[in-house]
Image (tube, rainbow, N blue to C red):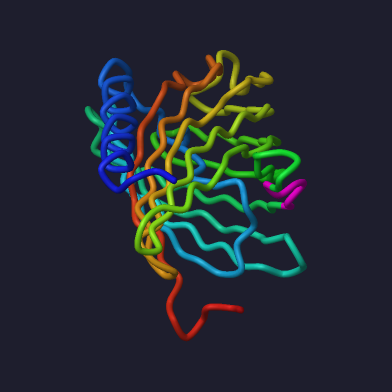
């Protein structure tokens, strides 16, 4: 079992590494980290801020609708550096547990699929990602838990307007998140992740986000 001191050191190390990466690259408006841990949610809300070439405010709502499965809604605003216009992004997706950690294997796996679009500055970018979130939860002292995770995914990306060479452009990209979730108690967690993109569409770049995850006590499903 990991000690609290080891946990804090691990978490700070992950955050410093992710911030260092994000400082070397500008953040693309709609290329924010998925913030998706490798287990299905019964009900939770995440509010996060992503930094880079501008500031992105992100809100996520996950809701369980079948055993080991949830749907998800994303929405937010992007304030790009050098632009007077705010951009809006919206998205939706699903998550389905494929495997849970056990004595035979140590990993949780969650299949994910979704669709999202960002609008603003005379251009539109649409992304259709499919992937798997992979990680493991370490139970620590006093009910605290730490979940490092990676979320690789393939995405069909389409840009129109200023983002395309001839009005529109599309490509298939490979992307992944590297993140950590620090569960403080049953209702509250701190979540951070860096998103690394293989897309060259619409100037896509790496990004970093940190946020707070909350499940209100009256809404917790047992």
Q: Is residue 204 above or below residue 183?
A: above
Residue 7 location in percent, x, y? 33, 42
Position of the C terminus, as image quadrant, is bottom right
Q: Quadrant of residue 205?
A: top left
Q: Tell me: 204 left or right of 114.
A: left
Q: Residue at x 36, y 49 (%)?
A: 77
Q: Is residue 149 above or below residue 187?
A: above
Of the pair 52 and 80, the residue shown nearer to us: 52
Q: Residue at x 44, y 81 (%)?
A: 217
Q: What residue occupies the far bottom of the structure in this picture?
A: 218
Of the pair 212 and 57, the residue shown nearer to us: 212
Of the pair 194 and 99, the residue shown nearer to us: 99
Q: What residue occupies the far front of the structure in this picture?
A: 1
Q: Quadrant of residue 6?
A: top left
Task: Confirm whether the magenta stretch covers residue 158.
Answer: no
Prevalent SS, magenta region: strand
Q: Residue at x 53, y 14 (%)?
A: 200
Residue 5 location in percent, x, y? 25, 43
Task: Confirm whether the magenta stretch covers residue 97.
Answer: yes
Q: Which residues are magenta?
A: 96-101
Residue 33 location in percent, x, y? 46, 38
Residue 193 location in percent, x, y? 41, 37
Q: Tell me: 178 left or right of 165.
A: left
Q: Is residue 188 above or below residue 203?
A: below
Q: Residue at x 72, y 38 (%)?
A: 105
Of the pair 34 and 41, the residue shown nearer to us: 41
Marker count (numbered): 0
Q: Is residue 119 above or below residue 168?
A: below
């Amino acid at each position: 079992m990991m000690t609290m001191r080891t946990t804090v050191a691990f978490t700070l190390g992950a955050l410093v590494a992710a911030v260092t990466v994000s400082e070397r690259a500008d953040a693309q408006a709609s290329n924010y980290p998925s913030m998706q841990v490798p287990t299905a949610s019964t009900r939770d809300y995440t509010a996060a801020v992503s930094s880079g070439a501008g500031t992105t405010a992100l809100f996520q709502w996950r809701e369980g609708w079948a055993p080991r499965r949830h749907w998800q809604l994303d929405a937010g605003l992007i304030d790009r550096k050098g632009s007077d216009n705010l951009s809006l992004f919206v998205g939706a997706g699903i998550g389905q547990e494929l495997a849970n950690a056990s004595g035979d294997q140590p990993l949780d796996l969650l299949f994910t699929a979704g669709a999202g679009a960002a609008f603003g500055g005379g251009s539109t970018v649409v992304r259709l990602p499919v992937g798997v979130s992979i990680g493991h939860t370490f139970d620590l002292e006093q009910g605290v838990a730490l979940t490092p995770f990676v979320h690789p995914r393939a995405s069909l990306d389409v840009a129109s307007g200023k983002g395309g060479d001839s009005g529109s452009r599309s490509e298939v990209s490979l992307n992944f998140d590297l993140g950590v979730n620090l569960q403080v108690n049953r209702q509250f967690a701190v979540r951070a992740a860096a998103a690394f993109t293989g897309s060259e569409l619409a100037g896509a770049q790496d990004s970093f986000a940190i946020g707070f995850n909350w499940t209100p006590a009256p809404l917790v499903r047992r």
